[in-house]
Image: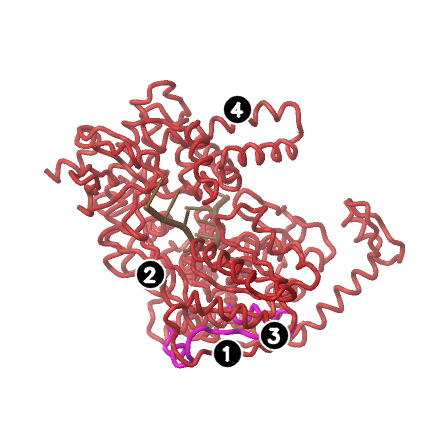
Amino acid sequence: MAQGGLNNASSERRPIPNPNGKFVDSFARRQRIAQHRKSLPIASVERRLMEEVRKNDTLIIVGETGSGKTTQIPQFLFNAGFCREGKTIGVTQPRRVAAVTVAKRVAEECAVDLGQKVGYSIRFDDVTSGSTRIKYMTDGLLLREALLDPYLARYSVIIVDEAHERTVHTDVLLGLLKNVQIARSKSIGCQNTENNKPKNGMLLEKENGIQNSSFLKHDRGRMFPPLKLIIMSASLDARVFSDYFGGAKAVHVQGRQFPVDIFYTHHPEPDYLDATLITVFQIHLEEGPGDVLVFLTGQEEIESVERLIKERVQQLPENSRKLVTVPIFSSLPSEQQMRVFAPTPAGYRKVILATNIAETSVTIPGIKYVIDPGLVKARSYDPKKGLESLIIVPISKAQALQRSGRAGREGPGKCFRLYPESEFEKLEDSTKPEIKRCNLANVILQLKALGVDDIIGFDFIEKPSRSAIIKSLEQLFLLGALTDECKLSDPVGRQMSRLPLDPIYSKALILANEFKCLEEMLITVSMLSVESIFYAPRDKLDEARAAMKCFSSPEGDHLTLINVYRASNEFMEKRNLSFGKEKADKILRKWCKENFINSRSLRHARDIHSQIRRHVEQMGLHIASCGDDVLLFRRCLAASFFLNAALKQPEGTYRALASGQAVQIHPSSLLFQTKPECIIYNELVQTNHKYIRNVSRIDYLWLTELAPQFYSLQS
DNA sequence: GAGCACTGC
């Protein structure tokens, strides 16, 4: 309402109230915004850029941080007429927060209500309407949209932002968009005018001898205007994208960053944690005011460095002790994460000890110094063993650049790389795209649902290994999602592809419908789909253990998760009657804290639960409960997760039946000490050991009975 | 005896 007011009052200088009761001089505010927009580096090239978009169906825009490309280009396109005839400009982001904050900013710049001309759409939160013309969204969400509208007919332009990050979603999306573009340019056929002749979509591909066909069936009944694609990347190397889009033109837009001095060590540091400590104190004692951001690889490292800093601070002279440390990593409860944004007390220096979360996801103000040991904990995937691992590896040059850039956002800064320059030169240019290091079951299921039959032949920007594709095809076949001819099965495969879940969880829901325990399985897969539900800080481990006992089931982690969910539900239902939603949320957070439950994870699970419930109801599945018949539910777990069954070995470790690997139950599991004979699990990750998590007890004989397609072959 | 970072009509 207040923003509508801003709109109407634009010609008056009278301050008007906003919902917070503060007064805003709308005229001055709009002037300030206009001035800011004009000052952005990108403002001076608006005409040239729009010219390029008109001439090229695909354009690569390389823009450094601070160029304003994400907020400005969609507005340029709108003003240039790309939303005529009700068409929409879609802008994808890899992260939800980015989609929301940028949309808010652009709505403000346009002086419109969010959700009208400018809106955003992310999972669980759609703030768009029929009049939305500039739509920010996550790339995963656009992929989901494509399942319903394969030609992405409502969009005239799609901008893929942060493409250099090369998330799985971005890579699949680029492959899809390339096909949509070809299909749409064909659909208009001889209708082409000189202006919208598909340049690199069709003609150049022919010239380059690249296959000029799309998996999308030619829909002769429908006409589509060509789809304009803009790939935005912060990477110095636009060639990958340009090559992929048949030699598409790349333009460079200047950024606005303050200079950052880079310092290297003379020799490699044998102990980077010690080197980190020394550098922290060097900065603290010798450099001017400004906060320090340290990139570490994980929680354990952060906690031990924090302890060491606190110890050493005490050894300094009294007047040099004004140093505070603040940790931040993803599994930290949000209230504690927020501490990085709290202003540093006067005269103090803040040292932020962060994981990769501070590289892109969280921007912390006030950073003048960055310490970069050059390492990151990264996920890798061995398709042959179906084993994920978290290992510490050197970062890429692009990551090093991104990290040092964090020191130059508000003024000139310094970055201390704890390795020699010669080592920097040896780093990979960019991080290996995620699609080459993850399980592909979900990607393949999506592509199959979109009509891509030949996955191995699919034109990926970077092809995953043949063995990874085959392993995931095999897994989907074993789950019944694919037919003998490797086509999507109907209805099982089709239903699975509609559910925004890991395929193995989607299948579990379909089976649970037959087992008449869908209510329990719905809760289970929602809880399994989020980060750890239990939160056990090191210093309160015993208390946390005791709290977990209240929910625990002797059968294992799955029923325990159900108990937690139901307890929270009961708690909420009681409170919701007497309090408003916000108050009830606050009380739930308190309940979580008392019970050592991560409230962010639980809320996320509740969101997933309601979304998936809508889906399965639409599919016509029946949400029945098995009541006290725990045996039935465990049989359903066995039928669903038979690929992840393990048998106890004499030494107390387990042997995973599908791969033959030796694995161990993770210490956070309820069954860590019980060690039943036969179990199923949901996650296998190698850290210090090959750990399995989310474990439940089953009966060995159920496997041959319930999954004969797999276990009769084995014996 | 232990948890990089994101994300999904």
In this rendering, which labeled residue sits more in front, label 3 or label 1? 3
Q: Name the N-terminal-most of marks 1 and 2.
A: 1
Marking on residue A263: 1
Residues shaded magenta: A403-427
The amino acid on which the numbered mark 3 sits, given as a three-letter code, is: Glu
Say which chain is brown.
Answer: B
Q: Position of residue A597 (x, y in %)?
A: 49, 37
Colouring rule applied to residues: by chain
The amino acid on which the numbered mark 4 sits, given as a three-letter code, is: Glu
**Residue at point 85% right, 50% down?**
A16
Q: Which residue is mark 3?
A: A287
Question: Viewed as shown, does residue A128 lie left or right of A395?
Answer: right
Q: Name the N-terminal-most of marks 3 and 1.
A: 1
Q: Which residue is mark 2?
A: A436
The reply to whether discs 3 and 1 touch (Cβ–Cβ < 8 Å) is no
**Residue at point 30% right, 56% down?**
A381
Q: To which chain does the residue with label 1 belong?
A: A
Instruction: Work out whether residue A713 can be spotted.
Output: yes
Q: A165 or A645: nearer the eye? A: A645
Mark 1 element type: strand
Give the spatial CA distance, label 3 vs label 2. 42 Å
In this rendering, which labeled residue sits more in front, label 3 or label 2? 3
